[in-house]
Each structure stands twice: as C-alpha cells, then as structure tokens.
Amino acid sequence: MNAVIRCAANHRSTIMDTKKLFYPAAERNKGPILSILQKYIQRDSDQVFLEISSGSGQHIAHFAPNFPQITFFPSEYEANLLESVAAYANEFVNIKQPLKIDITTDFRTWANGMFKEASIDYIYNANMMHISPYECSIGLFNNAGKLLKNNGTLFTYGPYAIDGKITPESNVNFDKTLKLQDPRWGLRDINDLRKLAEKNDIKLIAMIDMPANNKTLIWKKMLDTQQ
Ligand SMILES: C[S@@+](CC[C@H](N)C(=O)[O-])C[C@H]1O[C@@H](n2cnc3c(N)ncnc32)[C@H](O)[C@@H]1O
C-alpha cells in the first residue's frame, strides 16, 4: 500500500473511531448478556433481530458476529446517538444502518412502515424501561406484541422491582437517583410488566439474575390457539 492510500485508510478509521461512543457499563454487561442470547436464539437461517434503544451501539456490535444467520436492526430515539451506532454497525455485514425509533409510537410509522406485523424473531431492549417514562414500557410491549412472530422472543435487561419491592439497597438508591433526575423514571415492577405483556399475548418465560443486580427477562409471544 502506498503512503497516501495508507494515510487515507488510517484517517478514515480514525474518524470512524471518534464517532464510536464507549459506555463502560455496556462494555461490562455485553458478555454476560451474550451468553444468555446464545441459549435462547435458534440457529435457523434468515432471522430478524430488532434492538430498541441501541445507545452507543456496543451491544449489537458484540452480538452480531456471533449470529451470522441473523440480520440485526439497531435503533435509537436520541438523534445524536445514531452516528455512534452507525460507526459500530458499519463494521458488520449483518447489521443494518440504525433507525430512528420512538417506542411510544406505532411501528407502522417507523422507517416508512418497513416492519410488517409478525415479521420479527427477536426484539432486544436493555436499560430503557427505568430510564424513560412508563409510556416507553407500554410502547415496548404493544409494539412487540404486533411485531413478533408467534413464538418470537423479547429480551429485556436491567434492574427491576418485584411485588413492589426493590432489592438490594444499591438498587433502592439507584431508583431514588433516577426519580430525582426525572420523576417519570424509575425501576419497573415485573408484575406490572407482566400485565402489559399479557395484554399483548406475551408471556414471561424466564427471569435470569445477572451481575450487578440486574436481570435478563425472557418474554415469548404466544398466540392462544384455543380462542
Ligand atoms: C441508558 S440508555 C441505554 C442504552 C443501551 N441500550 C445500553 O444498555 O447501553 C437509555 C436509552 O433509552 C432510550 N429511550 C428513551 N426514550 C425512548 C423512546 N421514547 N423510544 C426509544 N428509546 C428511548 C434512550 O435513547 C437511550 O438510548
């Protein structure tokens, strides 16, 4: 490679790297979350995985090379994060360009209606429900109920309350800090989420303890064939 081309190539990669945001928490939890996805994701070909709230893009970039049979669609609500997600996505053939998605809106309005009902195998959402108004949790389950294929899976990750109780003390304090930042934020109760899910033919099938007092919840779209 001559010096000019090498310089141009280096320059390009440097620019790309400066666009990539780096969240230390995402770096710590991406490995444990991947190990859960590996247990629940099928090896079938041509599957579709939609991430809601990709944040920096670190999670999807860590998952995608492990599932070459899947096409990954990252998305973000914050316009200023899309560049970072795109910089990560550009490195993988099975990650599409990030979409701008506000989960409180109907999926038919997203990206010119590119997602059809019952067309998605997996929806993944980490650390959004407690750091956004409750309308975002409602929107997540309403849209997942429409978008997931029957037996499709919704993965959610973060800290949760159960039966009105938050444990341990560090999560109680985290909840208080969140509510001070925005009174509409705070840890969601798994029982409330279960009710939202059931309205959308989604059932909670597993609750997995994760490092740092988080959980991965595994939800399945299950159409009641008796009706
Ligand atoms: C703490 S970040 C989590 C980012 C990433 N998933 C992670 O775990 O590192 C919270 C995310 O919630 C997203 N969010 C807030 N309101 C939203 C909305 N109405 N629709 C979709 N995402 C939203 C923000 O854009 C942000 O990416």
Image (cartoon, rainbow, N blue to C red):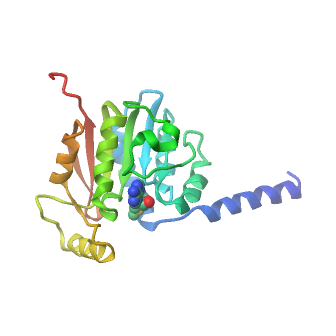
Q: Is residue 24 above or below residue 209?
A: below
Q: Residue at x 18, y 47 (%)?
A: 194
Q: Seen from this angle, which residue lies furthest left?
A: 163
Where does the image place residue 125, in percent across and percent down from the top left?
37, 51
Q: Which residue appears farthest toward the top when viewing the image? A: 226
- Residue 190 falls left or right of residue 25: left
On screen, residue 58 above or below 146: below
* Residue located 62% across and 62% down the image: 19
Query: Relative to the observer, which residue lies in front, 35 or 146?
Result: 146
- The quadrant of the image that shows the C terminus is top left
Q: Residue at x 59, y 58 (%)?
A: 83
Out of 220 and 68, give the one closest to the viewer.
Answer: 220
Q: In the picture, residue 117 is in which quadrant?
A: top left
Q: Position of residue 146 (x, y in %)?
A: 33, 36
78 shown above or below 168:
above
* 34 is higher (above) or lower (below) than 27: above
Q: State left or right for residue 174 relative to residue 85.
A: left
Image quarter for ligand 1: bottom left
The tally of labels here is 0
Q: Quadrant of residue 132?
A: bottom left
Residue 85 visible within the image: yes
Residue 15, given in percent of the width and then of the height, sits at 69, 62
Q: Can residue 30 be seen in the rendering of this structure?
A: no
Residue 30 lies, in percent from the top left, at 41, 55
Q: Which residue occupies 30% across, 56% down?
A: 135
112 relative to 168 in the view: left or right: right
